[in-house]
Amino acid sequence: MSAWAAGQPFPGVSTLNSPDASIIANAAIVPAGINGSITVVAGQTSDLIIDANGYFAPPNGNELLFYSVTPCRIADTRASQGKTGAFGPPTIAASTPRDFPIAGSSCNIPNSAKAYSLNLTAVPQGRLGYVSTWAAGQPYPNVSTLNSPDGSIIANAAIVPAGSNGAVTVMASNSTDFIIDVNGYFAPRGGQDALHFYTLTPCRVADTRASQGFTGAFGPPSLAASTGRDFPVLSSDCGVPSTAKAYSLNMTAVTQGPLSYLSTWPAGQPYPNVSTLNSPKGTTLANAAIVPAGANGAISVFASNATDLVIDINGYFAP
């Protein structure tokens, strides 16, 4: 399924995939087209749910700006992972809201943050109808963030407004462990690191599949298991300027078997021990990712198992 600005031709990118017909969610920043509309096309007949959590508009003096951070793990409710207090066990109980104080975590997110750029991973204990995430202190908004009807580990990106005491609320339909990673936040202007968002016509940066015609740094070979690889986004054919400090991407793993995890972070920095997507069933799977630009504007990708990778871009953050 692909989504793009209405009135523009199909850009040859994808937003999500469900080869086994599972209910699947993915975050997407989509440029507004004619009359503020977006266009969606699906490879096969499908129902579609669209939830909104914000928008980008021209500066007016009161806007929030983006501040990228090195990807960092905030919370992990699994007993084996060493997180404690508000950021560790117990497992999230079915239909029981739980607050996570993002601004009070060890990831150095300031109290001035008004929204967070997160990657959320559910590690279910069985079927998981949905997980919802919203600003703490507000009523349940009747939206969903991710779904795992067959109980597989699944991740999804989310921009979530900060609520009471800088916290977000998470509620799951069924019992599940839950992982929260952060890669940036939105706050009023407060320094030289503040970034605005600039849209791009969605564009394919890289595709490691031999059949797709990409070459050099953006084409084959496939990602090898447990091996990092850099993608120099600025050198792609997508017109990303050198001023870009972070990218709004869609990452699609075209797996060759089970994929425990795939991680993405700024090139030149050490592996941050976070994940971007998971495909334990070995199906083609996508997830959105806001990734800070690293050395020479590149990003690093690491896969636990061999996989092909498709990278699409829809915008970037710059001063």
Image (cartoon, grey):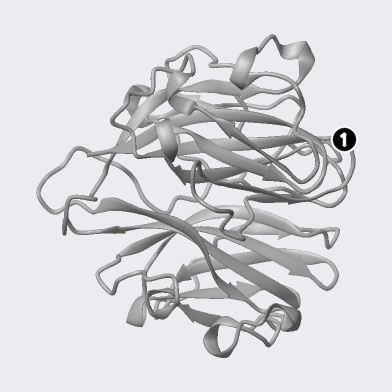
Q: Residue furthest left?
A: 61
Residue 72, image x, y percentages? 51, 63
- Using residue 75 as the reference point, say whether residue 283 is left or right of it: right
The quarter of the image holding the N terminus is top right
Residue at (52%, 38%) from the top-left corner? 299
Q: Is residue 263 above or below residue 214?
A: below
Residue 159, image x, y percentages? 44, 56
Residue at (84%, 52%) from the top-left corner? 280
Residue 197 at least partly seen: yes
Q: Residue furthest bottom?
A: 85
Q: Which residue is mark 1?
A: 256
For label 1, the SS is loop
Q: Is residue 103 above or below residue 284?
A: below
Residue 1 at least partly seen: no
- Using residue 4 as the reference point, say whether residue 149 is left or right of it: right
Q: Is residue 173 above or below residue 44?
A: below
